[in-house]
Amino acid sequence: MELQPPFRKIIHVDMDAFYASVEQLDNPELRGKPVAVGGSEIRGVVSAASYEARKFGVRSAMSGVLAKQKCPHIIFVPPRFDRYKEISSKIRKIFYDYTDLVEPLSLDEAYLDVTENKKGNPSASMIAQEIRQRIWEELELRASAGISINKFIAKVASDINKPNGQKTINPEEVLEFLEQLPVNKFYGVGKVTAAKMHNLGIFTGLDLKQKSLEELSKLFGKSGVHYYHIVRGIHNSAVKPDRIRKSIAAETTFRENLSSEVFMLERLDKIADELERRMKKSNTKGKTVTLKIKYSDFTQQTRSKTTNHFLQLKKEFYPIVKELLYQDTLNNSVRLLGISFSNLNTEKKEPVWVQLKFDF
């Protein structure tokens, strides 16, 4: 079976160690040194690590304590999300010089559909190279890119020559590439699903390809249909410049764990103020209020309540937050609290990028 043209030309651009690289850009003393954004040697979680820190095994979402153990000379710096957003908007302006079909995934990565582009350049690989070069010349930051016929393969490809590289998977190379790809690299295959596949003797795309549509549907339900098609290079999800916003949230990680509901209510009061500000700024309202609780042992719990009308103001939703807090006893001391809204009134709004807010 061969893939049939016409083929789209999709680029996935992924900034290299974005938060840490911005910190090194702004503070020359940090350049060439292991840097962790967020966390500390006594608590907190690392948001991003420089490549110098990654050589020691430091990764995002790792506790600061473990990061310090792995790399004793690591330098912790507090996150500056306003600065990251500022740089991200400049990167996005470069993207828009080539195409209006830009789908941001976060502050540091995006899909671009350059099948038809503003430069009239038929080579997506050359466009990716030019974009990466401009990001370096204009912002002094490095980016990697993946180029292929759909979003999934482009995203996988962008990891292959990281950092500061790019990889093109041409149409005639797609099927062989997918057959050799480990199943845990496939879009939609998480750790649990990968373990299940391994138990079934499915380790690569080629193994996955041996399973019929009926077998995969029986084993994985609706996801089985997705796996059946994606391993054959069929992934028709378009680059969506106007992604539908599904939730809006504000949360805080605390310097010290909280064990009293009184102290938690004090923090939730401030978080609610911030969430109301963000709701008003984005003209967003929601029906489902969710309280997020992360305990000192890193286990997480959410408690939600849905109303029959849209809410936006703190005076409307904060009583629900308090109700959710007292809904059940707490399992442990608490290191993070957050409030979010879903079931929003934003059918066709552009996303408002909300990043984790730290209390240090």
Image: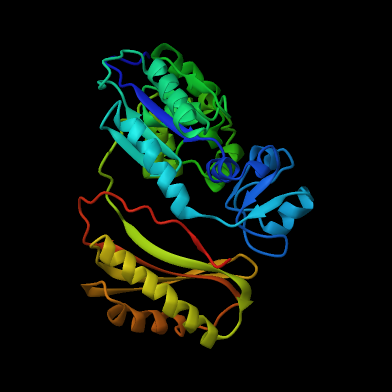
Q: Nearer the viewer, residue 323 or 93?
A: 93
Q: Is residue 78 left or right of residue 125?
A: right
- Count of numbered circles in the view: 0
Q: Say which quarter of the image contains residue 258.
A: bottom right
Horizontal side of 250 relative to 298 (left or right) equals left
- In this picture, is 100 found above or below 245? above
Residue at screen point 58% across, 31% down: 203
| Relative image position of residue 131 (x, y in whole percent) | 41, 25
Q: Quadrant of the C terminus?
A: bottom right
Is 252 or 236 nearer to us in this picture?
252
**Residue located 37% across and 74% down the image:** 273
- Relative to residue 95, is residue 211 drawn left or right? right
Residue at 45% x, 37% y is: 187
Image height of 281 relative to 100, above or below? below
| The N terminus - image quarter | top left
Can residue 332 be seen in this snapshot? Answer: no
Q: Is residue 340 visible?
A: yes
Taking depth in this image into account, of 127 and 233 the one nearest to the observer is 127
Residue 260 image offset from top left, x and y in percent: 57, 85
Q: Quadrant of residue 105?
A: top left
- Residue lying farthest bottom? 262
- Where residue 126 sits: x, y (%)? 40, 15
Q: Residue at x 48, y 83 (%)?
A: 266
> Is 36 situated above or below 163?
below
Report the coloring of the rendering: rainbow
Residue 310 placement (x, y as % from top left): 21, 71
